[in-house]
Image (spheres, rainbow, N blue to C red):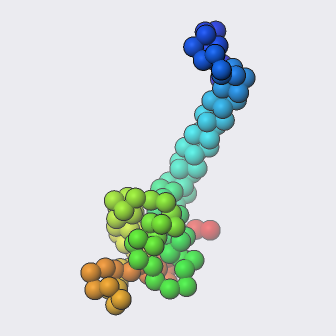
């Protein structure tokens, strides 16, 4: 990417070369992220956040609460709810009552989750 000819006038303390490098890296990162998302959907039929959450659940030795999964995947609670709904809908996880907190649930992978996702 190139900055405009008036870049230095508008940002006297700015470095045009640094701004161009930053903008190029940002665009490359967005392109890579978009391609990863496209590939995940094409390969597994699920978006990256769903597959990342499944990996977190699958890698845990014990059931996790939605909050714990959310913290490990950096997803908001609203996004986590939709993500867990998708995982449950696909039969990859099962929600079980949380015996430590009667208001909550824990998420446990089904044994078939491992075999239903191509590796």
Q: Position of residue 6 (x, y in %)?
A: 61, 9
Q: Can you say whether 89 is above or below 39 in the image?
A: below
Q: Depth check: 25 or 43 in front?
A: 25
**Is 111 or 106 nearer to us in this picture?**
106
Say left or right for 59 vs 103. right
The location of residue 92, given as percent across then percent down, is: 44, 74
Residue located farthest toward the front when viewing the structure as drawn: 13
Residue 55 visible in the current orientation: yes
- Which x, y percent locates residue 58? 54, 77
In terms of depth relative to the viewer, which is nearer, 21 or 58? Answer: 21
- Residue at screen point 50% across, 70% down: 54
Is 1 on the left-hand or right-hand side of 83? right
* Residue at the extreme left of the image, as rendered: 103
Image quarter in which the C terminus is found:
bottom right
At a point 70% along the width and 22% down the height, the residue shown is: 15
Residue 4 image-quadrant placement: top right
Foreground of the two, 16 or 105:
16
Q: Residue at x 57, y 13 (%)?
A: 10
* Vertical position of residue 12 compared to residue 37: above or below: above
Answer whether residue 4 is visible to the viewer in this image.
no
> Could you say where residue 84 lies in the image, as x and y percent from the top left?
38, 68
Does residue 40 appear left or right of residue 85 in this picture?
right
Furthest-bottom residue in this view: 99
| Quadrant, the N terminus | top right
The residue shown at (55%, 85%) is 61
Total marks in image: 0
């Amino acid at each position: 990417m190139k900055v405009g000819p008036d870049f230095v006038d508008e940002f006297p303390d700015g470095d045009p070369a640094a701004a161009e490098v930053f903008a190029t890296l940002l665009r490359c990162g967005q392109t890579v992220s978009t391609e990863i998302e496209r590939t995940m959907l094409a390969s597994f039929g699920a978006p990256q956040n769903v597959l990342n959450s499944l990996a977190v659940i699958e890698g845990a030795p014990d059931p996790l609460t939605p909050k714990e999964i959310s913290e490990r995947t950096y997803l908001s609670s609203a996004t986590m709810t939709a993500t867990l709904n998708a995982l449950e809908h696909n039969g990859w996880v099962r929600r079980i009552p949380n015996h430590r907190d009667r208001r909550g649930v824990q998420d446990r992978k089904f044994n078939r989750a491992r075999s239903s996702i191509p590796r």
